[in-house]
Image (cartoon, grey):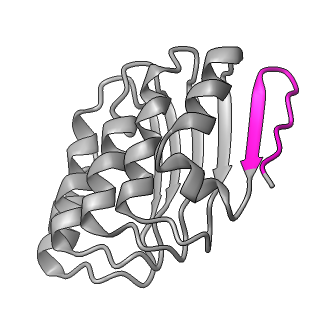
Amino acid sequence: STYFVLQRRHVHLDSKRLGSALSTSDVLHTSLDMISLGSLILNLACSKFGPSEAEGLGALGSATSLHTLHLNLRHNRVGDVGVEHVVVVARARHLQSLWLDLSFNDVTDAGAHVLSTLKGALSLRSLTLLLVENRVGDQGAQALATMRP
């Protein structure tokens, strides 16, 4: 089941079933409408989270007080299409710090190119990307390398 821990405007959501709930965004929209939070930890590792569920993360873009996001999508089915949805959230004007684990998600060069566009996210001051065991080749690696200052 889904649980919330509210402490000093920080929320930790952890559930294997939360991924499917996000496909309609109902849980997340309701949660963000009720609280003003600065940090959010979403641990969705091994939750069969795919592109349609990633689309539901768009609700995070409306949480204007959210400045820190820790998003664990390790061992899922996000793929390149899901990466596009995650990047939309990461480019939100208010987000300053993002830790994103996309390891074991079948991300290819195309997804790496999409991730490389985060270099243009003006408010993002800290970015940690984990891409272990994906299908990113030389072209994707070169695109990611352009993100370094």
**Which residue appears at 39% of the width and 38% of the height?**
90
Residue 51 percent location from the top left of the image:
35, 60
Query: Is residue 9 depicted above or below 17 in this figure?
Result: above
State the residue at coordinates (58%, 15%). 65
Q: How many marks?
A: 0
The foreground one among 25 and 71 is 25
Where is residue 106, by image quadrant? bottom left
Looking at the image, residue 25 sits to the left or right of residue 133; the answer is: right
Task: State the extent of the magenta-drawn residues as a range.
Answer: 2-13
Q: Let me know if residue 21 is in the magenta part.
A: no
Q: Quadrant of residue 110?
A: bottom left
Q: Is residue 18 above or below residue 16?
A: above
Give the side of residue 2 with respect to residue 46, left or right: right
Counting from the top left corner in percent of width and height, residue 58 is at: 40, 36
Q: Position of residue 89 (x, y in %)?
A: 39, 37
**Point 47% across, 27% down: residue:** 95
63 or 141: nearer the eye? 63
Q: x and y percent of residue 139 in the render? A: 11, 73
In the picture, which quadrant includes the N terminus?
bottom right
The answer to whether residue 36 of the structure is visible from this angle is no
Vertical relation: 3 (above or below) 74: above
Seen as rendered, the residue at the extreme left is: 139
Q: Is residue 118 visible?
A: yes
Q: Residue at x 67, y 30 (%)?
A: 39
